[in-house]
Amino acid sequence: MVSNREQVEQVNPTYEELQEQHQTHEKRLEELNNKAWLTPDEELEAKQLKKLKLHLKDQMARLRQAAS
């Protein structure tokens, strides 16, 4: 039988998974920022990555708050 915690962990990503995703997005943003200029597609990607990073950061904050 699966416990409530295991069910939640299967549905909700763990803090470490969120942190990994955040770091992956950060690395890609650094790559884009190191370019002399960005194509319109890259500019859009950079904006989307920033929004995703912020969303992940919010999710991590909620997990930290729930754990305390």
Image: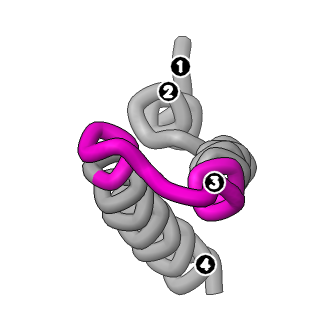
Residue under label 1, please give it: 2
| Mark 2 Cα-neighbour bin, 10 Å: few <14, some 14–19, many ≥20 | few
Q: Amino acid at mark 3?
A: Lys
Q: Is residue 48 highlighted in magenta?
A: no
Instruction: Please tell me the numbered disc located at residue 35.
Output: 3
Q: Which of the two discs, 3 and 4, labels the residue nearer the N terminus?
A: 3
Magenta part of the chain: 29-43
The front one of 28 and 67 is 28
Q: Position of residue 33 (x, y in %)?
A: 61, 63
- The residue depicted at 51 percent of the width and 71 percent of the height is 57
Instruction: Please tell me the numbered disc located at residue 10.
Output: 2
Q: Nearer the viewer, mark 3 or mark 1?
A: 3
Q: Which quadrant would the N terminus be assigned to in this image?
A: top right
Q: Which of the two discs, 3 and 2, labels the residue nearer the N terminus?
A: 2
Distance between the alpha carbons at the discs numbered 2 and 1: 10 Å
The front one of 56 and 7 is 56
Q: Position of residue 4 (x, y in %)?
A: 47, 38
Give SS at disc 3: loop
Residue under label 4, please give it: 64
Q: Which of the two discs, 2 and 4, labels the residue nearer the N terminus?
A: 2
Give SS at disc 1: loop
**Is the residue under label 2 in contact with that under label 3 (CB below 8 Å)?**
no
**Can see residue 22?**
no
Q: Which quadrant would the C terminus be assigned to in this image?
A: bottom right
Q: Position of residue 2 (x, y in %)?
A: 53, 19
Compared to 1, does 39 lie above or below?
below
Q: Which of the two discs, 2 and 1, labels the residue nearer the N terminus?
A: 1
